[in-house]
Amino acid sequence: MASPSLTHGFQYASAPHQAQTAIAGMWLFLASEVLLFGGLILSWIYARHFNPVGFDAGGRETALWIGTVNTVLLISSSFAYALGAAFIRMANVRGLIGCLALALVLAGAFLVLKFGLEYREDFAKHLFPTAAPFGVTGDPGRGARLFFIFYFIATGLHGVHMLVGMGLVLWIIRRARRGHFSPDYNTPVEVVGLYWSFVDVVWLTLFPLIYLVGRS
């Protein structure tokens, strides 16, 4: 059977052409994702401009320590993935698998903290937008409720993207165990790495909006 690095689809001129097309396709997909999250973030900033007191009150209700730990976890997971991509370029399949497994563990810890602990605390404090009574009372309550509408939509979307990314990483690990990757052929590793890094960048944008802006 021919090596994946030497084969390509009939619609491509060569294997490098197929690899370049795959990477360009991922960049195009990520551009569409930027439009999705960019629109949400711009709406968030616009709403905050007219409700600064309420958004500040909502931000002070978030768990800063969880957000900070999760930021470290995601940055570390991206570093682990990048290290794994470097390993496969050096023909170290075991290193690739180990690093990607570590990235998965770190991402899993992020999800446990975010959805298992922080969301539970949010619900316990009646911070879900439809809660009655809502956890923030008085004049800031209306703006804080709007803050948490954006909060749950943004973090929920990000969580869904993380789950998709974890599924893709598992797929890469499975293929790596079957010996599908080498220094000559590792395009899927690079493509999934772009997506994994994008998920990280989205969180680095959400973190200050949720936990830092207006907290002082």
Image (cartoon, grey):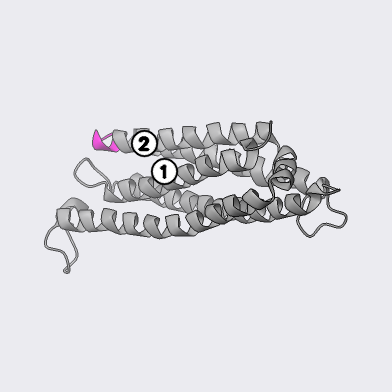
Left or right: 73 with respect to 84?
right
Check disc 1 and give the amino acid type: Ser
Specify whether residue 178 is in view.
no
Residue appearing at x 39%, y 55% in the figure: 30
Left or right: 88 with respect to 133?
left
Q: Position of residue 71 (x, y in %)?
A: 55, 35
Q: Secondary structure at mark 1?
A: helix
Left or right: 38 with respect to 14?
right
Q: Secondary structure at mark 2?
A: helix
Specify whether residue 46 is in view.
yes
Left or right: 175 with respect to 206?
left
Residue contact at pointers 2 and 1, CB within 8 angstroms? yes
Q: Quadrant of the N terminus?
A: bottom left
Mark 2 is surrounded, within 10 Å at the Cα level, by few (under 14), some (14 to 19) or many (20 or more) other residues, namely many
| Segment tinted magenta in the rendering | 88-92
Q: Nearer the viewer, residue 53 or 78?
A: 53
Q: Position of residue 15 (x, y in %)?
A: 16, 56
Residue that label 1 marks: 197
Check disc 2 and give the amino acid type: Ala
Residue that label 2 marks: 82
Q: Quadrant of the C terminus?
A: top right
Q: Within the magenta stretch, is there residue 89?
A: yes
Q: Position of residue 167 (x, y in %)?
A: 47, 53
Q: Is residue 143 above or below residue 112?
A: below
Write down the quadrant of residue 113 in the picture.
top right
Q: Which one is closest to the eye, mark 2 or mark 1?
A: 1
Q: Is residue 151 above or below residue 13?
A: above
Which SS does the magenta portion mostly show? Answer: loop
Between discs 2 and 1, the one toward the N terminus:
2
Q: Is residue 139 above or below residue 98?
A: below
* Residue that protrudes farthest toward the bottom in the picture: 11
Q: Position of residue 118 (x, y in %)?
A: 71, 42
